Image (spheres, coloured by chain):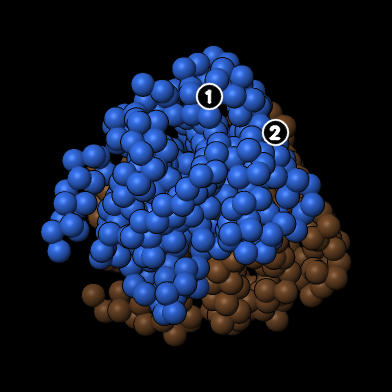
Chain colours: A brown, B blue
Amino acid sequence: MSKVMTIGEILVEIMATRRGQTFREPGLLRGPYPSGAPAIFIDQVARLGQPAGIIGCVGDDDFGLLNIERLKRDGVDTSAIHVVKQATTGSAFVTYREDGERDFVFNIVNSACSNLNAGHVDAKVLKDCRHFHVMGSSLFSFRIIDTTKKAIEIVKAQGGAVSFDPNIRKEMLRIPEMRAALRFILELTDVFLPSGHEVTLLADAADEAGAVREILGLGVKEIVVKRGASGSTYFDATQRVDAEALPAHEVDPTGAGDCFGATFVTCRLQGHAPDRALRYANAAGAAAVSQVGPMEGTADFAALDALVAQSTQR
Amino acid sequence: MSKVMTIGEILVEIMATRRGQTFREPGLLRGPYPSGAPAIFIDQVARLGQPAGIIGCVGDDDFGLLNIERLKRDGVDTSAIHVVKQATTGSAFVTYREDGERDFVFNIVNSACSNLNAGHVDAKVLKDCRHFHVMGSSLFSFRIIDTTKKAIEIVKAQGGAVSFDPNIRKEMLRIPEMRAALRFILELTDVFLPSGHEVTLLADAADEAGAVREILGLGVKEIVVKRGASGSTYFDATQRVDAEALPAHEVDPTGAGDCFGATFVTCRLQGHAPDRALRYANAAGAAAVSQVGPMEGTADFAALDALVAQSTQR
């Protein structure tokens, strides 16, 4: 089976326990949970029985160990995770405001994550990799962008494909070189996985239909638009497939998009048609939001089948 | 009244809630608490009604705000705390092992704290400062050591005194230049505030009596050895004064040494004799350990008087 690999931030997440809790006063928290968008993605890939690996950096601390142990347990190849002695594993503190929006305190750009560099990527590390996934959240420095490009070029040269989830902060796109770098990655992308509002982020077109046409025109083969509770839509050169979301009791949305993308990519690699891949991906999103903790809701096919069966019985 | 100032790390502390809890799995935590040895020290100084200020760096986040608000509320001049846009406020995760020892995950050396530099220190910032306190924990880079030396020289030139609490990790003293820099600070010190095992750290002598003689010989005027539950001892050129610890229900020792030192220094500045200053300092230590959270146990004179009265009634 094709090995899926990704690159980027491996974090711990610390969560407030009460809606409306702030980080300007002491309170009860829960954590550390294993986290980081590419780490969640690759954990979900491995849970589906696909060979999977991640290139990343953690600190020489319990937060790094926590992540390595969890990923290993779930079947991820962690041999390309580097332990950086002089750095601390990245972290994200998360609280939900009364209005449902999230507030964060991040320690990422000065954490171990930021030590990723081109030296961490070569043909040996990417041996057997036939699918490489890029998380927009990981591309917070030009050094990491260059490192990611290097990985993409190696995987493409050995006949592999690339998926790209552009979950990136809008402010970063105001930097012209950053926008150009992300466009470059988009042009090498086979499967583009934006959330609804992100479809137009890297396109000239202002609306979804126009952006989809434009991006398919660049050579991107498949686009899947994630719409959370409103389901998802698949586009390729010849068809559009819509799929409803599965009913879910949402307790924590963090990681749902990552699990969705991982499941879609894995299903396609395992030969499932787009409609079936979408259904499984929606089920993975539903599983993810039903658990507290960003990586706690990754699920295997048995769990996804049970969720799908449950939803069709209603 | 003389203004006391200090420099160094301003942190948040996140505490495990259960003895034996590890950071290799999710659990219940408590925090963020305002913290950082110099921040705790200066908060305690201000609680005793002494003019007080701190030079430090925080990130542009809620953890920084939490500290600034707390210090301000307690009367500390926070105008020399710099908000660094591109950094995260430092943090320390703390858990108690079954054997009573503490385990940490620190994010300090790559946090906002590390941005301190000589540009943050000048005669204007140190205007009115007649006592400068140095925390060994803050001296984790040569840039910060140089910045601290600059502050000491300014304060000394305007007729002020220096206190020095060498709470430093032993490993750092293996770096010869680091040891030399700390010796240099010791030679400019008026009040030296080591914990029991630290008396010999920067001395050639191997035992306490020898080290005390040696350090007084350098020109240090007063030495106070902190012995936790075993009390404390004051030394100067002519006398030794021992003081018993106050009985305390210890729930969290973090910050006790900082509160002790702050109270001793403030009492001496306010004209109290060594034995009375020691008694208040011991009371401040007892107050500190009785509260969960490193800065939660700072106390005013009314609270310290009550503790002393309580202990003599027994």
Local crowd size for mark 2, using a 10 Å CA cut-off: few (<14), some (14–19), many (≥20): some
- Give the mark toward the camera: 1 or 2: 1
B111 sits to left or right of A153:
left
Residue drawn at (33%, 36%) of the image: B272
The quarter of the image holding the C terminus of chain B is: bottom left
- Judged from the image, the secondary structure of the residue bearing numbered disc 2 is helix
Of labels 1 and 2, earlier in sequence is 2
Q: Cβ–Cβ below 8 Å for labels 1 and 2? A: no
Q: Quadrant of residue A97?
A: top left
- Judging depth in this view, the residue of B145 and B185 nearest the camera is B185
Q: Is residue A18 left or right of residue A185?
A: left
Q: Is residue B169 shown above or below A208? A: below
In this rendering, the answer to whether A61 lies above or below B270 is: below
**Whether residue B253 is situated above or below residue B141 in the rendered picture:** below
Q: A111 or B303, which is in the foreground?
A: B303
- Residue B260 in view (yes/no): yes
Establish whether labels 1 and 2 are both on one chain: yes
**Which residue is at the front of the view, B223 or A257?**
B223
Please identify the residue farthest to the front as the structure is shown.
B238
| Residue A126 picture location, percent across and down | 79, 68
Residue type pointed to by label 2: Asp
Considering the numbered disc 1 on the image, is that residue within a helix, a strand or a loop? loop
- Residue B105, position in %: x, y? 53, 61
Q: Position of residue A244 (x, y in %)?
A: 37, 61
Image mark 2: chain: B
For residue A277, the mark is none
A57 versus A297 height, above or below = above
Q: Which residue is mark 2?
A: B146
The residue sitting at 57% across, 50% down in the picture is B166
Q: Chain of mark 1?
A: B
Residue A222 on image: x %, y %? 62, 56
Say which mark, if any, is on residue B160.
1
